[in-house]
C-alpha cells in the first residue's frame, strides 16, 4: 500500500467516516457508485471490489459480468453535505476485468490511453472546462426558470446568488478550485468555472461538479440540468474547454512562441489544425445528444462553423489573450462541446484529434476575423469553411468514418456508444412531437 493509501486510511479513521462511495462512470459520463463501510476501505485499496458490470451502459455482457473496481486514492474526498449525518467519502475508481487488466469499456481508461500517447510525445495535456447549467423550479408538470436574470446580473438578495455560493463552497470543500461564478445569458442559466489542471484531474472534477450542482439545487427545492438546450429561443448551455500543452522536459508551454501568429507555436497551430480536421466527427462525442443540435444553431453564440480565430466567438476554436508575464497560460479554446458529454471521452477524442495534427504536421487554414454567422453559404464555401453536423445521426456517420477518433475510444466503447446513440436518434426520429400536432393535426 502506498503512502497516499495509508494517508486516507488514517483520515477515514480520524474523521469517523462511516461509508465510502466507490464511483465510476458509464460511457455517457453518468456517475455510478458502490458503497462500502469505512471499515472496508483497507481491503478495497489492497484488493479492489468486485461488482456486476452487465447492467452498466456500455460495459460487459451478461456472460462476462464479473469486474472489479480499483480505487484511485488521489481522488479521495469527504462529501461536505454529509457532515451533519452519516459521514461519507468518495473515491473515483478505475474499472478492471477479472484478469486484472484495465477494462476497455471504462471511459477513464480511454482518457488515460490518450494522455499516455501525449506523454510519449513529451506533452502534458491541460484542460479547463466551463460548464453552464440551468436551475428550474418544479411547478406541477412545468419546469419554470429559477430567475429572470441576464448575463452577469447581480442582486444581493437574489436566491440564485445564494445557491451559486453554496455550490461554490461545496466545491471548495471537495478541493475543486473555483475561479469564478456568474449568471449566464439565458434566464435561469448559470456558470461556475474551476481551475484548469491535467485532463484526467479536470475530467474527475467535471463529473464531481455535475452531481454537486444537482445535489445543492435539490436541497433548495430546485433541479439543475445540464441539458444543452432546455428553453426554445434562449441560449443553450455549453462546455467551452480551454486546452494547453506543456513540454514535459522543460515544464514550459509548448503552445507559446512570441514570433508566431497570436503568439502560438508551430505545435499549437498543428494542434488546432488537427481538431479542425476532425471537428465534424468530434461532434458525436462532445455534443452527444439529440438536443445538442438544437443548441448548435446560428444566432445563439454556439459556434457551428469549422474555423478558428483570436477574438471571434463565432469561431469553433478561439485563441484567448494572455497577460504579459503569463506566457505559460497560452491556450486554445474549443467552443462547441456541451455539458451533456462524458468528460473522459470528450477529452480523449479532443486530445487525439490535436495530436493527429501534430504527428501529421497539419497546417490550419487562415484564421477568420469576420462574424461567420452573417456569411452566406457562398461566402463560407469561398473561404473553405465547413459546417458542423446538423443532427446527431449526421455526427455519428462522421465518427464512423474517422479512424483516429474511433481508435481513441477503442473498439469496445465505440461499438457500444454507436449502438446506443443510433437507438436514441431512432427514438427521436419516430416520436410524434407536440410541435407536429400543433402544426399538422387540424391543417392537413
Image: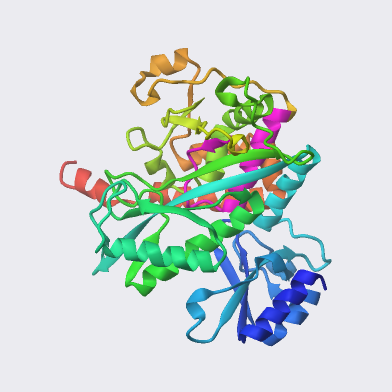
Which residue corresponds to the image point at 40% horizontal and 14% vertical from the top-left?
378
Nearest the eye: 66 or 29: 29
- The reply to whether residue 49 is in sight is no
Which residue corresponds to the image point at 35% horizontal and 65% vertical from the top-left?
163
- The reply to whether residue 86 is in sight is yes
Q: Quick one: quadrant of the N terminus?
A: bottom right
Nearest the eye: 440 or 216: 216
- The outermost residue toward the left is 442
- The outermost residue toward the front is 325
Q: Where is residue 50 in the image (x, y as percent from the top left)?
A: 73, 75
Nearest the eye: 91 or 168: 168
Find the magenta span and give its range: 330-358
- Looking at the picture, does residue 237 appear above or below residue 207? above
Res 250 quadrant in image: top right
**Horizontal side, residue 245 vs residue 320: left or right:** right
Residue 349 is covered by the magenta coloring: yes
Q: Position of residue 270 (x, y in %)?
A: 66, 26
Q: Where is residue 265 in the image (x, y as percent from the top left)?
A: 65, 26
- Looking at the picture, does residue 357 appear above or below residue 406? above
Res 77 quadrant in image: bottom right
**Horizontal side, residue 98 vs residue 436: left or right:** right
Amino acid at each position: 500500500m502506498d503512502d497516499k493509501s495509508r494517508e486516507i486510511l488514517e483520515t477515514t479513521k480520524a474523521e469517523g467516516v462511516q461509508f465510502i462511495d466507490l464511483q465510476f462512470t458509464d460511457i455517457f459520463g453518468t456517475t455510478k457508485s458502490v458503497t462500502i463501510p469505512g471499515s472496508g476501505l483497507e481491503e478495497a485499496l489492497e484488493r479492489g471490489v468486485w461488482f456486476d458490470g452487465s447492467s452498466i451502459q456500455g460495459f460487459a455482457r451478461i456472460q462476462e459480468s464479473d469486474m472489479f473496481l480499483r480505487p484511485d486514492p488521489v481522488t479521495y474526498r469527504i462529501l461536505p453535505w454529509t457532515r451533519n449525518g452519516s459521514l461519507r467519502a468518495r473515491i473515483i475508481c478505475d474499472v478492471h476485468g477479472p484478469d486484472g487488466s484495465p477494462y476497455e469499456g471504462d471511459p477513464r481508461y480511454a482518457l488515460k490511453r490518450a494522455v499516455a500517447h501525449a506523454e510519449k510525445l513529451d506533452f502534458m495535456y491541460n484542460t479547463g472546462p466551463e460548464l453552464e447549467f440551468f436551475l428550474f423550479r418544479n411547478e406541477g408538470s412545468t419546469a419554470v426558470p429559477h430567475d429572470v436574470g441576464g448575463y452577469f446580473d447581480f442582486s444581493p438578495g437574489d436566491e440564485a446568488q445564494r445557491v451559486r455560493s453554496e455550490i461554490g463552497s461545496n466545491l471548495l470543500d471537495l478541493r475543486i478550485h473555483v475561479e469564478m461564478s456568474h449568471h449566464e445569458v439565458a434566464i435561469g442559466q448559470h456558470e461556475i468555472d474551476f481551475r484548469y489542471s491535467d485532463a484526467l484531474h479536470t475530467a474527475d472534477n467535471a463529473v464531481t461538479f455535475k452531481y454537486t450542482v444537482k445535489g445543492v439545487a435539490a436541497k433548495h427545492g430546485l433541479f439543475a440540468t445540464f441539458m444543452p438546450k432546455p428553453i426554445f429561443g434562449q441560449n443553450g448551455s455549453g462546455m467551452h474547454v480551454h486546452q494547453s500543452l506543456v513540454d514535459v522536459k522543460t515544464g514550459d508551454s509548448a503552445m507559446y512562441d512570441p514570433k508566431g501568429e497570436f503568439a502560438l507555436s508551430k505545435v499549437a497551430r498543428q494542434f488546432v489544425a488537427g481538431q479542425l480536421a476532425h471537428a465534424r466527427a468530434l461532434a458525436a462525442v462532445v455534443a452527444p445528444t439529440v438536443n445538442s443540435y438544437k443548441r448548435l444553431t446560428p444566432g445563439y453564440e454556439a459556434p457551428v462553423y469549422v474555423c478558428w480565430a483570436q477574438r471571434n466567438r463565432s469561431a469553433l476554436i478561439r485563441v484567448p489573450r494572455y497577460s504579459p508575464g503569463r506566457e505559460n497560460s497560452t491556450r486554445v479554446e474549443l467552443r462547441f462541446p456541451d455539458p451533456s458529454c462524458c468528460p473522459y471521452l470528450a477529452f480523449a477524442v479532443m486530445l487525439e484529434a490535436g495530436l493527429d495534427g501534430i504527428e501529421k504536421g497539419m497546417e490550419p487554414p487562415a484564421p477568420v476575423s469576420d462574424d461567420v454567422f452573417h456569411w452566406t453559404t457562398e461566402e463560407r464555401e469561398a473561404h473553405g469553411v465547413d459546417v458542423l453536423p446538423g443532427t446527431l445521426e449526421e455526427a455519428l456517420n462522421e465518427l464512423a468514418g474517422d479512424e483516429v477518433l474511433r481508435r481513441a475510444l477503442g473498439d469496445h466503447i465505440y461499438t457500444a456508444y454507436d449502438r446506443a446513440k443510433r437507438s436514441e436518434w431512432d427514438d427521436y426520429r419516430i416520436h410524434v412531437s407536440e410541435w407536429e400536432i400543433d402544426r399538422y393535426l387540424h391543417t392537413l
